[in-house]
Image: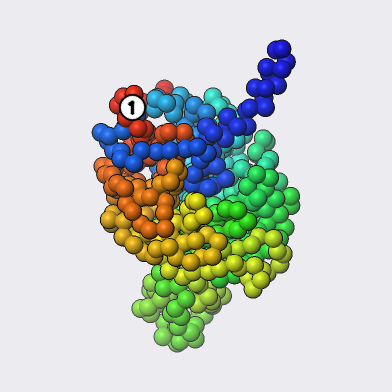
Amino acid sequence: MRFLAFALLVSLLPTVGLAGSWPEFRGPHRSGTAPQARFPTVFGPTTNLAWRSAVPSGPSSPVIWGDQLVVTAFESNQLLTVALDRHTGAVRWRTSLEPGSIESGSRLSHPASATPCTDGERWIAYFAPFGLVAYDTAGRELWRLPLPTPITGHGASSSPVIAGDLVLQLFDQDVDSYLLAVDKTSGKVHWRIPRPEFRRGFSTPLPWPPEKPELAVVAGTLQLVAYQLSDGSERWRVSGLPNEMVSSPVTAGELLFVAGWTPGSGVPRMPAWEGLMANGDADHDGRLARDEAPSGPAKQHFHYIDADRDGRLSRSEYETIAHIFDASRNVALAIRPDGSGNITDTHIAWSQTRGLPYVPTPLVLDGRIVLVRNGGLASCLNARTGDFHFQEERLGALGDYYASPIGADGKVLTISHPGRAVVWRAADTLEVLARNDLGEEVLATPALVGDTLYVRGKNSLFAFREADATQVKSMEFTPRR
């Protein structure tokens, strides 16, 4: 009887783990939803609040398995991994690492931008100024893999993902881009695939198929590429993406979906190299220094074009970017992932060019694709055909959008950078159910497990749950000595 009871318990473990987890960026299989999950329609600092805990700075999203919730952060020049009790918000453990070189970038750049991941036995975090590190469920370090800081101009933010026995980490940067696969148990490099035609990018790889992945699907400069997990060899590629990808690929059913937008995509705007030399090469060395660059695209994009950061533009650097800018296309694509080679002309199920997100990853829910763009404009498409149900309708919450939409129980949630959370019905027409002010800026994508919604703000981690039996709790973050 004891053996039978043990066997029954073991047989239930995967189901228990799946139902009680949000194991990576955007949750189970990067879907933006979770089994049998639900969340309150109305919530805020004083409404349907289960607990609120102060956390150190970081835009990475919360990750959950069982009773533990983990975030990464940066405080007092330390790279932090912090585990909290997901039921109370109390800190369970905290680790710290010394950073290496921290790239300066935009005002929202942060050393702890990447979301960690877990398989229930280990927590794996990536910090651009350090590399990869794995901890057990008590916060004891299992392995570390120091890596050079990527050069992106904004700080790296691609998140690690677990695919079978491997951890995938993308390093798309201004020079020497590559995709890395390491053993999740030992941290040893399994393969490293150069991506020389790809410049800076911030997308996160998608293991496919979700249950037993064979491929790593990666969005980057102008292209979507699928690599064999076994050895990193290329299976197929699709052309026609923007020059810089932030949004990540997703899947539902038999299709993959990818959407991207950058300013000025597809508009030729780079003058000929010979004209720049004639008007700007004062020292006649065949290269262009920043103070030699004439007003216009060469000066405006100097830092981006100067891939090796030597302070001078070569013809090769300039013409590479001119080609990328001219070939850039803002688009949403649905792709059948069963081909090989260049499948651009054979395996695109549909494409659209309106309502496209810059940062938020699309949400596929109940046969629909939800897109959210800056300014609080939402679009909804039929996932099978690509036809719009509604297009660029206003949510009534202005601002930029960095958090990706999530959904469950017939509802969609998206949160603007100023911290206004909009809940609307998952339907063919836009019906806003609530607009909730959180009182803090939000960059991180929310997490959802069971009946509880977890939202990370600038200074706080919130847990929201319907009011019955909910008591408001506030936990102060106290560094563990």
Name the residue: 36% across, 26% down.
478
- 461 with respect to 243 (left or right): left
Name the residue: 52% across, 55% down.
367
Q: Position of residue 264 (x, y in %)?
A: 41, 73
Q: Is residue 187 visible?
A: yes
Dot 1 amino acid type: Asp
Q: Position of residue 374 (x, y in %)?
A: 35, 60
Q: Is residue 97 visible?
A: no
Q: Where the C terminus falls, by quadrant?
A: top left
- Compared to residue 129, the image places residue 196 above or below, namely below
- Compared to residue 362, the image places residue 340 above or below, namely below
Q: Position of residue 428 (x, y in %)?
A: 42, 58
- 310 with respect to 5 (left or right): left
- Compared to residue 243, the image places residue 186 above or below, namely above
Instruction: Work out whether residue 89 or residue 202 is closer to the camera in this orientation and state it.
Output: 89
Q: Which residue is mark 1?
A: 468
Q: Position of residue 342 (x, y in %)?
A: 68, 69
Instruction: Work out whether residue 206 or residue 389 is closer to the camera in this orientation and state it.
Output: 389
Name the residue: 41% across, 54% down.
427
Instruction: Work out whether residue 198 or residue 118 is closer to the camera in this orientation and state it.
Output: 118
For residue 447, what is the image quadrant? top left
- 371 with respect to 441 (left or right): right
Name the residue: 49% across, 51% down.
365
Q: Secondary structure at mark 1?
A: loop
- 154 with respect to 229 (left or right): left
Q: Tell me how the rendering is colored.
A: rainbow
Q: Where the N terminus falls, by quadrant?
A: top right
Few, some or many residues within 10 Å of mark 1 (<14, 14–19, 20+): few
